Image (cartoon, rainbow, N blue to C red):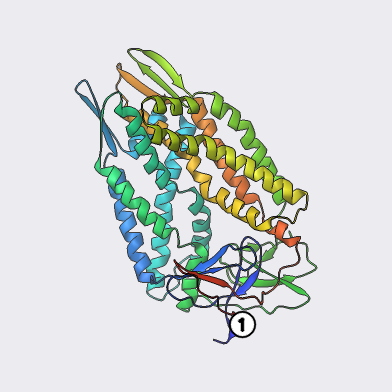
């Protein structure tokens, strides 16, 4: 394929357009403008990815069929799996918490694996999957909300918290969730755009290479990644349709600032009850008590588990506050039309995206504690109103980050066009020179 017919790719952070070429083992292509990762070398074939997805589904079944931990008090033993924790939380009347954790820890990961199997099977045989376009849209919606790694960390925190009051031992499900976390992390590299590129490589879907010109501006489809030409004088928020998958395409996200601010301010409102109201209530023969997020951190510290206390503090206190402040800073600098420190602001936005789901840690800890300490008449733990509020904060901040369009800030530097500069490629641990894209 000649250089001018190579597929194009858009940097999702600064909207620079590049020609996509093959990388050597160990190389990663980075945007020369903002430094974001564009694509990575992968030696895995579609059949390899299919095997990983099948393995993940099998391990997923084992992880949810067996208890993650068991607790023994005065001769009574209580075992708990993720589904047990969700069921008990629902039975206690905390439906919002049960629905949030049930979807994030079980329903959405299962659906994500099902979609991957649905598309990888036919693609590995050189066929287009039925409903391929819709499946890829669904996969893109699911990926940010699957929180199995957060649940795994929540199990470890819950075991440490209960170890001081009873005999607690890990179960088969805990090991299975550890393996599942590794497999899902690997499958996390398989974004919808990457799957579309695999489909291109086996000639299942067409590759459209638009021509740049003074009357058009290039942008990519958020569903399939296909770069296409839009009229330069068109409204940036006008509706267009992708030439390949027919998804709605906007040059920039419509009303991004208003939607991001609205979601962020709602998160700030819920952040107050999330920290003031108890996230957990304990009833025992010794009396009743309520625990806030900071109270739980102090309790872990006093127990001598300073390392776990630090993890909980970072995930449940520092991370949510950091997300709120970072999003406020990003929105204000974009509103003030600032063009300074764009690269650091890009790194800040990437950090907000990365840490988004980890704030759900305390919510998972609470439901697992409720399942393990479910001894009627002796001890009972249930979620508090603060847990529901905290979960809402996590959801709202993630939606706010998704609504924000960082490309608007980069637009102030100038209109994006096909870059003539080379892509920066790096090989770990040594740096290698980038390749011209033609």
Q: Nearer the viewer, residue 329 or 222?
A: 329
What is the number of callouts on the image? 1
Nearer-the-camera pick, 347 or 391: 347
Residue 316 visible in the current orientation: yes
Side (left or right) of 324 relative to 380: right
At a point 34% along the width and 62% down the height, the residue shown is 52
Secondary element at tag 1 = loop
Question: Can you identify the residue that label 1 sits on?
Answer: 438
- Quarter of the view holding residue 368: top left
Q: Residue at x 30, y 29 (%)?
A: 163
Q: Quadrant of the C terminus?
A: bottom right
Q: Position of residue 118 (x, y in %)?
A: 40, 63
At a point 33% along the width and 55% down the height, the residue shown is 57
Q: Is residue 52 left or right of residue 133?
A: left
Residue in front for this viewpoint, 346 or 150: 346
Q: Is residue 393 above or below residue 347?
A: above
The residue lying furthest to the bottom in this view is 2
Instruction: State the quadrant of the N terminus.
Output: bottom right
Q: Residue at x 70, y 47 (%)?
A: 331
* Residue extending furthest toward the left: 75
Can residue 204 be seen by looking at this rendering? no
Where in the figure is residue 6, as x and y percent of width and height?
Answer: 57, 81
Q: Is residue 108 above or below residue 368?
A: below
């Amino acid at each position: 394929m000649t250089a001018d017919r190579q597929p194009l790719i858009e940097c999702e952070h600064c909207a620079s357009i590049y020609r996509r070429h093959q990388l050597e083992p160990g190389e990663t292509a980075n945007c020369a403008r903002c430094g974001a990762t564009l694509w990575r070398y992968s030696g895995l074939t579609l059949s390899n990815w299919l095997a990983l997805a099948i393995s993940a589904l099998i391990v997923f079944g084992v992880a949810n069929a067996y208890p993650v931990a068991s607790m023994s008090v005065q001769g009574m033993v209580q075992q708990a799996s993720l589904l047990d924790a969700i069921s008990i939380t629902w039975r206690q009347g905390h439906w919002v918490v049960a629905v949030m954790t049930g979807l994030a820890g079980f329903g959405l990961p299962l659906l994500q694996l099902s979609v991957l199997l649905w598309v990888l099977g036919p693609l590995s045989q050189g066929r287009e999957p039925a409903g391929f376009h819709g499946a890829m849209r669904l996969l893109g919606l699911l990926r940010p909300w699957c929180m199995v790694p957060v649940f795994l960390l929540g199990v470890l925190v819950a075991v440490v918290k209960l170890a001081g009051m009873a005999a607690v031992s890990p179960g088969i499900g805990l090991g299975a969730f550890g393996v599942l976390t590794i497999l899902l992390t690997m499958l996390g590299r398989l974004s919808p755009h990457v799957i579309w590129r695999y489909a291109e490589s086996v000639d299942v879907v067409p590759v459209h290479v638009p021509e740049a010109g003074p009357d058009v501006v290039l942008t990519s489809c958020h569903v399939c990644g296909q770069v296409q030409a839009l009229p330069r004088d068109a409204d940036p928020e006008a509706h267009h349709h992708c030439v390949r998958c027919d998804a709605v395409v906007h040059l920039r996200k419509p009303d991004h600032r208003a939607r991001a601010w609205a979601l962020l301010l709602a998160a700030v409102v819920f952040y107050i009850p999330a920290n003031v109201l108890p996230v957990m209530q304990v009833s025992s023969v010794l009396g009743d008590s309520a625990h806030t997020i900071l109270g739980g951190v102090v309790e872990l510290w006093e127990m001598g588990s300073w390392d776990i206390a630090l993890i909980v503090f970072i995930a449940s206190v520092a991370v949510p506050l950091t997300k709120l402040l970072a999003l406020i800073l990003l929105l204000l600098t974009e509103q003030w039309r600032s063009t300074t420190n764009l690269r650091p602001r890009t790194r800040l936005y990437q950090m907000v995206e990365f840490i988004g789901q980890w704030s759900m840690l305390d919510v998972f800890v609470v439901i697992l504690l409720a399942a393990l300490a479910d001894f009627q008449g002796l001890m009972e733990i249930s979620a508090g109103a603060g847990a529901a509020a905290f979960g809402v904060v996590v959801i709202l901040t993630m939606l706010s980050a998704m609504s924000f369009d960082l490309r608007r800030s980069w637009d102030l530097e100038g209109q994006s066009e096909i870059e003539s500069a080379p892509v920066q490629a790096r090989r770990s641990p040594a740096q290698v020179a980038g390749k011209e894209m033609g």
